[in-house]
Image (cartoon, grey):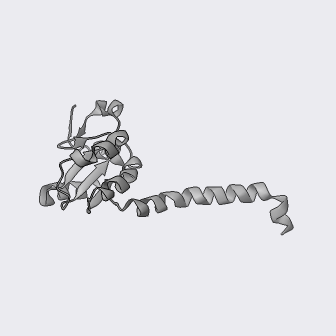
């Protein structure tokens, strides 16, 4: 007990770092989205007619977007979710630049009635690194 008292700062740092490691796991579960890779995204689009939603901000669009994706910035998603036009019974794949912000969109989309939500692991960066097609905007 004396050790904890004498080293309370170290204990606090240990607890904070542990919480930061666990937070992404909790966020994934709370978002209601499953993470998928580029191959699975392609299969969902080709076989099940999945929609693809790009939630990057407009300033991030200079490198293009996934072919056929609809672009709605995350900052505008709550206001525009009713106008997306995707079939709510089909899969919807959401992506951002690196795969973190797309998880935050899950709650908004789930509340709007989308039931099959997926996040592209690694985001647009992983898509382009795999050499997959993009369209210029």
The image quadrant of residue 133 is top left
Location of the N terminus by quadrant is bottom right
Q: Position of residue 45 (x, y in %)?
A: 17, 54
Q: Is residue 56 above or below residue 122?
A: above
- Which of the pair 109/35 is nearer the observer? 109
Q: Position of residue 108 (x, y in %)?
A: 35, 53
The image quadrant of residue 20 is bottom right
Can you see residue 36? no
Count of residue discs: 0
Please give left or right for residue 21 compared with residue 49 in the image. right
Can you see residue 29? yes
Location of the C terminus by quadrant is top left
- Which of the pair 53/17 is nearer the observer? 53
Please give left or right for residue 41 compared with residue 77 in the image. left
The image quadrant of residue 7 is bottom right
What residue is shown at x 34% (from left), y 43% (from top)?
Answer: 125
Q: Position of residue 48 (x, y in %)?
A: 14, 60
What residue is shown at x 31% (from left), y 48% (from top)?
Answer: 95
Q: Position of residue 59 (x, y in %)?
A: 35, 30
């Amino acid at each position: 007990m004396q050790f904890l008292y004498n080293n309370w700062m170290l204990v606090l740092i240990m607890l904070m770092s542990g919480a930061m490691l666990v937070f992404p796991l909790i966020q994934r579960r709370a978002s209601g989205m499953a993470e998928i890779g580029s191959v699975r995204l392609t299969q969902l689009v080709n076989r099940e007619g999945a929609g693809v939603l790009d939630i990057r901000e407009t300033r991030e669009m200079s490198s293009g977007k996934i072919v056929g994706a609809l672009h709605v910035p995350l900052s505008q998603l709550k206001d525009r979710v009713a106008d997306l036009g995707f079939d709510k019974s089909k899969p919807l794949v959401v992506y951002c630049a690196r795969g973190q912000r797309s998880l935050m969109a899950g709650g908004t989309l789930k509340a709007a009635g989308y039931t099959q939500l997926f996040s592209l692991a690694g985001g647009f960066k992983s898509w382009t690194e795999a050499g997959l097609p993009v369209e210029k905007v």
